[in-house]
Amino acid sequence: MSTPDTLLIAGRTFRSRLIVGTGKYKDGPQTAAAIAASGAEMVTVAVRRVNLDRSKESLLDFIDPKKYFLLPNTAGCYTADEAIRAARLGREVGLSDWVKIEVIGDQKTLYPDVAATLMATEVLVKEGFTVLPYTSDDIVVAKRLIDVGAAAVMPLGAPIGSGLGLQNMANLRILREMLTEVPLIVDAGVGTASDAAVALEMGFDAILMNTAIAAAKEPVLMAEAMKNATIAGRQSFLAGRMPRKLYASASSPLDGISR
């Protein structure tokens, strides 16, 4: 029997290579339905957007922590200190000691502040957190994050929520070729299922998305499409594509055919 192809992050195994967010859905039931259709096992939740007063309806009412692995994120933070406080709060209220660090450096583009991200990652790793930082597609920054203990590196494919797809293919390929110490997860910018397939075909270990599913006309159907695309992209990567050729090559060999 062949060994199952699984995603391994910080010693934890996941069958699905699709990670999904929980923002922008019209309501809790739609959120739950889309997550279920995606087949994802890891689900991100913004610490700042979770209603911690359980006497009121909360996002957590629609996500079963026994079924899904919760990954708190620091969305909405603009400084390292804010991100560190959000991560600590998530752990204190029992969400997780894992955290997706997200420190925004520019309000218009939502590009990450890589210096603050590096600082927050270093501090939280020392405090025992498993840190998955959202970052730029800069190979130098990625190496620095690994040096301070990041459990994965999550470069953007395009600006958050843009739906532009993978816009920085050369840099992403460099990252994939040069970094093998930790999983690489494409985060942000995906618009449709083919984008997910391309990321996995390139050899990225996983992909994280939210808006591409939540903002679709039919979010639940798009979630299922993303699940299938992720599986197909990974299978294509493992299978190994045929060599590219400049000229045609007959599908049926002509050797031995009389004319």
Image (cartoon, grey):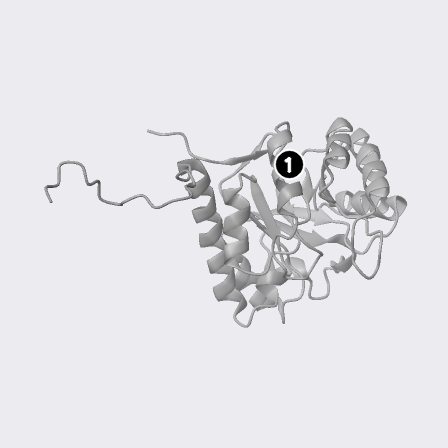
Residue drawn at 45 percent across, 35 percent down: 5
Instruction: Residue 196: give x, y in percent of width and height.
Output: 53, 52
Q: Quadrant of the N terminus?
A: top left
Please indicate, yes or no, whether residue 36 appears anywhere in the rendered image: no
Amino acid, disc 1? Ile
Above or below for 60 versus 121: below
Residue drawn at 74 percent across, 40 percent down: 138
Above or below for 55 versus 155: below
Residue drawn at 73 percent across, 49 percent down: 73
In depth, the one of 30 and 177 nearer the eye is: 177
Instruction: Residue 206: give x, y in percent of width and height.
Output: 56, 43
Q: Secondary structure at mark 1?
A: helix
Instruction: Residue 106: give x, y in percent of width and height.
Output: 84, 55
In depth, the one of 237 and 8 nearer the eye is: 237
Give the residue at mark 1: 174
In this rendering, would 238 be left or right of 119? left
The quadrant where residue 153 appears: top right
Instruction: Residue 65: give x, y in percent of width and height.
Output: 60, 49
